[in-house]
Image (spheres, rainbow, N blue to C red):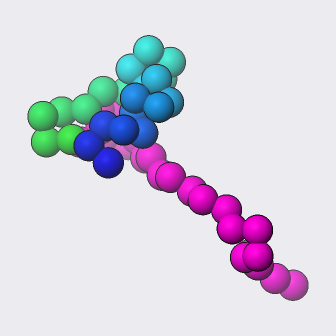
Amino acid sequence: MNGSILRLLEGEEQLGVTLTSAYQFVPEQTTAALIVHHPLAEYFHI
């Protein structure tokens, strides 16, 4: 990811989240994900 999601989300400005030189989030409890939906996918089909 090397900072792409953080830049897209404007993480430093909007969320107060930064990256260390080793690309770790600060605060350390921060989680990021890139989730892509596929129109034919069935999630949790009941």
Q: Residue furthest left?
A: 21
> Eyeballing the image, is 17 above or below 28?
above
Residue 21 position within the rendered picture, expressed as x and y whole percent measured from the top left: 12, 34
The residue lying at 39 percent from left, 20 percent from top is 12
Disc tally is 0
The part of the image, by quadrant, that contains residue 5 is top left
Q: Nearer the viewer, residue 30 or 12?
A: 12
User: Residue 11: percent from the left, percent from the top?
Assistant: 43, 26
Q: Which residue shows up at 13% across the image and 42% down it?
A: 22
Residue 25 counted in the magenta span: yes
- Majority SS type along the magenta span: loop
On the image, the x and y values in percent for residue 35 come to 57, 56
Q: Say if 40 sits above or below 19 in the image.
A: below
Q: Residue furthest top?
A: 13
Front one among 11 and 36: 36
Q: Which picture quadrant has residue 4?
A: top left
In the image, residue 28 above or below residue 7: below
| Magenta span contains residue 37 | yes
Asked which quadrant contains residue 43, the reply is bottom right
Residue 36 in the image, given as x and y percentages of width and height: 60, 59
Q: Which residues are magenta?
A: 24-46
Farthest residue in the bottom direction?
A: 46
The C terminus appears in which quarter of the rendering?
Answer: bottom right
Q: Residue at x 26, y 43 (%)?
A: 2
